[in-house]
Amino acid sequence: MKKCRTLFLIIFMIVQAVSFGEEALHVLSGGGATFPAPLYLSWFSDIEKDFGITIKYDAVGSGGGIEMLQERQIDFGAADLLLTGERNELSPDEILQIPATLGAVVVVYNLPGKPFLKLSADVIVAIFTGEINKWNDPLIQELNPGLLLPAMPIRVIHRSDPSGTTYLFSEFLSENSLQWEESFGTATKINWKIGMGVSGNSKVIEFLKIVPGSISYTGFNYAVENNLPMAAIGEKLTGFVSPMMTTISKAAEYAVIDNGLIHLEKKVGRDKYPISAFSYIIVFKEQNYSGRTLEISGDLMKMLQWSLTKGQEKAPLLLYAPLPQNVVLAADSLLRQIVFDGVPVMEVSRAQ
Amino acid sequence: VHNRLFLIMLLLFTTTHLESRTIKIGVQHFEPYISETESDSGLFLEFIKALASENDWKAEYVSASAEELREMLARDEIDLLCAIPYNREMKEQLDFNRETFISTWGVFYSNKKMELKSLTDTDKKAVAILQDDPYGKEFKTLANHLKLDLTIIEFKCGHLALEALQEGWVDIVLLDRFFGALQKKEYQLIKHPVIIAPSDLRFAVKIGKNSDLLQHIDRAMIWQRSNPESAYQQRIESWIELENYEQVPVFVYWLFIIIVAVIGFLVGANRLMKRQIQHQTASLQQKNAELEKEIKTRHNITLALQHTKSILEKTIDNMQDGLLIISPEADVLIIQNKALEKLFHYSEQETLQMLKNKLFENDKALWQKIRSSINVQGFFQDEMELQRNEGRLLPCEVYISEIEHVENSRLWIIVVRDITERIHLRQAQKMEAIGTLAGGIAHDFNNMLTPIIGYSQIVKMSLPDESDLQAYLDQIITVSERAKELVSQILTFSRKSELKRQPLRLVPLVKETIKLLRSSIPVTIYINESYDVENDLISGNPTQMHQIIMNICTNAAHAMENKQKGKLAIELYQHFGPVKGWTDNYLIDPQGFLCLAIRDNGIGMTNDVVRRVFEPFFTTKSANKGTGMGLSVVHGIVQNYGGMISVESQHGEGTVFYIYLPTVEANESVQDDTDIVFASEKPSEHILIVDDEAYIVDMNVHLLKSKGYQVTGTTRPEEAIQMIQDNPNKFDLLLTDQTMPEMTGMELASQIMKINSELPIILSSGYLNSIEKDKLHQFGIQGFLSKPYSMTQLLNMIQNLISKSAMIA
């Protein structure tokens, strides 16, 4: 009997050790926006080296990320747009939307000679609604006096899937064009009257390259990577601003911090690129859900803190504009609101 | 017309309360059912338009996306939706009319050939879909499920999608079945056999609202459907026709391909067959050539076989030996060659009978011997006598071997060789051997008799005539002389006698001998003589010839002793051509032979006797009737004369002896040695005597000394040479023996001639053939004495030579 008991004890200890081993694996899972995915994957690789925390990220689009978080399948979601609690979205009260990086939507086109175009919000609306359908239309020509534009038909390519990029683009157009706001508004998916719908940023660029005279919108980093000409956006009076790391970061300095929501207005301005936006990491304020542990919340906290500090230093290398200091501070204040069983995780992990 | 009237009546009746009603119709672009650009075009809208017009309604069209339209319907902002797929999802949200307006589905088109047999074939391709149709939506879902890596481009309308296809921006377009059919020709579309999202399109209203509207639609639809003239029906039919239009060309295309393929196949097959036929023809020609070659080869083989057969047949027929091939039971004869026929003079049947008698029936022991010999050593070989057709027995060597024949049967190959000649040769060799033996003995006897007679004569001369011993000495001399006679006969038989020969006429000699014979044979024997000769001259000794005739005739007389009428025929005739002797040896003399045939009808001789008849001391007579030397001596004499003797005898019938003798020309002289008269006066010459036999030397020394000669004797020829060398003129005559161990008398003579060519030389010998005799003069030999010589002969020759030499000197 004694022997049996000893044996049982040993087996129990082994089982315990194995289960402890599993807990010690430190795995986080997240999913959502495709736009910041390259940056995030780079970050998470570094974090695994620094802290031994493995982070899985599924780039399923902003909508998908929100959905997964809503169902509490993941530790964090990622979205390019600010959740406002409309429809079936998560209530902004239970979540925290932490700006992680800066993105920009740029207008790209496929024209012979890759000319540098200047476009105003009105002209963009006219193009994307089909009011202007030739490249040598006087309205475009007027904005680009030095260019000899071809008499090619304009072929609009837009996103056919629900997309944060579309949201930001339509948001910009809505903010600057009453006509657009009334006809289409701001949405992840627009009921386009013209053009060709393609799903995903990569496919948009792929198709744009095929179709001569085409125009579309995409993320800044995609356009840079594919060496596509990007239109400078502005108005004749204020001037045109080209999308660049500096002009995008500059836009972030105008961030609006409103009741825990940090976002950017898309109004055209003198030295800022107007279609700039934050990409957010979304977490539940209360971390104790679906049997999660304090350790996981601690790991999540480490990830978020690293992203706001070291992550920002790395962002320009991957063509993402770093967050300005004011935004980092605002974001940091959001991290403090993350709690586990009501106790701020930052405090607990710091105490540990 | 009646139908239409009825319908109008019906519609009027059912729609009275809908009078001047405004119906708001939600439309979204869905060609060819709803066209957004022209608000009232498209199959659905035309139908509604007609219905509204018939019912006097007012139709208003509201354009929005499908989703928006459903929202609007829910908010009662519109009354009716068109071209809504009748499926579970939609049934939950909307009320549908009962009748399906149209059944349709999505079809993939391209303008380039490509492999598109399933959805997975769209992988890595750019596919154009329409924004609001049910197929694009379904395709996106399926592509997502199948995890296909493709680019889906959504277009507002089909024409833009088709334009993109034409521009090459997209690879495939997913279109409505009928829209595709309508555009097919213009855009040169290739339809692929993949369809997607089959849908029944119907009209729909908000749940629980406007059900009367749906009833109107259903009724109108039923009417339209049942009426082939109706716009709806005609449109549908034209579309289906268009759709099928592509089926026909495809069918025709395939048919064409098949026909081309079949023609191609036939042409190919034809060519192939042609080639094969050519190939086969070539192959046949080759085979033909090979066959011809083979036929030629076979023909050659046949010729060769015939040739070989002919050679074999000729060989068999030309064989000296008899050849027989028979069954071992001697009941079937397969081959009998000509030689066998010649030997035995049998027909095939007679041959078989003879063999059967000889080998199988008469002599069981012989049969056993043959059988066991074949079994043990594979053949049988023996000598035996086989009977000829005429009854004579032929001495034969029989060789029998057994060979395997067809179907395990066996054959005997029998080779029969006539061995008469062999037996004769054997006899001749025997005679030769006996002759040599007898000659040798006779020679020695002669050597012994010479001193016996010599000394006896010396003693007789030394004794006074009145001595009693004279009578004894006479006895010795008489018996010795008889012995000398016997030895002489033996030597004659062995052809070593040296009787003088002379040209001799045979006819008188024969006649004379017959006279003598007449008196010595019984009177019952009739002697018939006949002569048919031109030249009867031979070289011979009359005594010997006499001896021959007497001997044979005496024998004949003995053979006819018991005959009532003995008949002795003596024939002498000329014979030209070859002569066959007793041993079947041949003699040829261009001058021809004289043949003496002596024939009797006596008891004859058996073959065994014939075979031995010439052997010395062989006799069938009783001891007192003969010595058995008679015929031997005859044989010896004839042989010595260069002639031949043969004998034919048939037992019980008689015997014939043929004696062939070579003739000589009349002028030919035969050397005649006449005796020299012995001189009586006492000589003083010095004579050298050489003989290996010491007693002969002694005898001669004694004899010649007694006659007054100086005599020196030696047994060694070399000593004699030495003596003459020392003093060549010392001797006046040399007497030498021929046969000596150190050197022959001739050799001695030739040596001495070199020293003193004048010296007379006498050679003596027991026997010496004629050739050697001819050579004597070459060696300087002037005299020859045949042993045993008499003292008188010796003294005469010495005296003769010495006097000759003196005369020359």
Image (spheres, coloured by chain):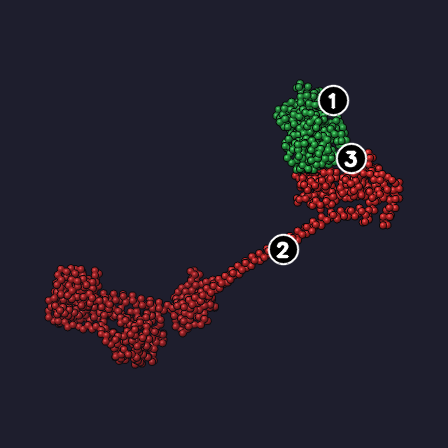
Chain colours: A green, B red
Residue type of the residue flagged with mark 1: Asn
Of all chains, the one bearing label 2 is B
Provide the residue designation for mark 3. B68
Do marks 1 and 2 share a chain? no
Q: Of helix, strand and loop, which one carries label 1? A: loop
Residue type of the residue flagged with mark 2: Leu
Of all chains, the one bearing label 1 is A
Residue, x 15% and y 69% (percent of image)?
A: B801
| Residue B253 x, y percent position in the rendering | 68, 50
In the rendered view, tell whether residue B355 sits above or below residue A67.
below
| Rendered image: mark on residue B266 | 2
Label 1: how many Cα within 10 Å (few below 14, some 14–19, many 20+): few
Query: Residue B493 sits in which quadrant?
Result: bottom left
| Residue B461 x, y percent position in the rendering | 14, 69
Do marks 2 and 3 share a chain? yes
Provide the residue designation for mark 1. A259
For marks 2 and 3 on the same chain, the one whose residue lies earlier in the sequence: 3
In the rendered view, tell whether residue A241 sits above or below residue B93.
above
Q: Of helix, strand and loop, which one carries label 2? A: helix
Of all chains, the one bearing label 3 is B
Query: Residue B512 sits in which quadrant?
Result: bottom left
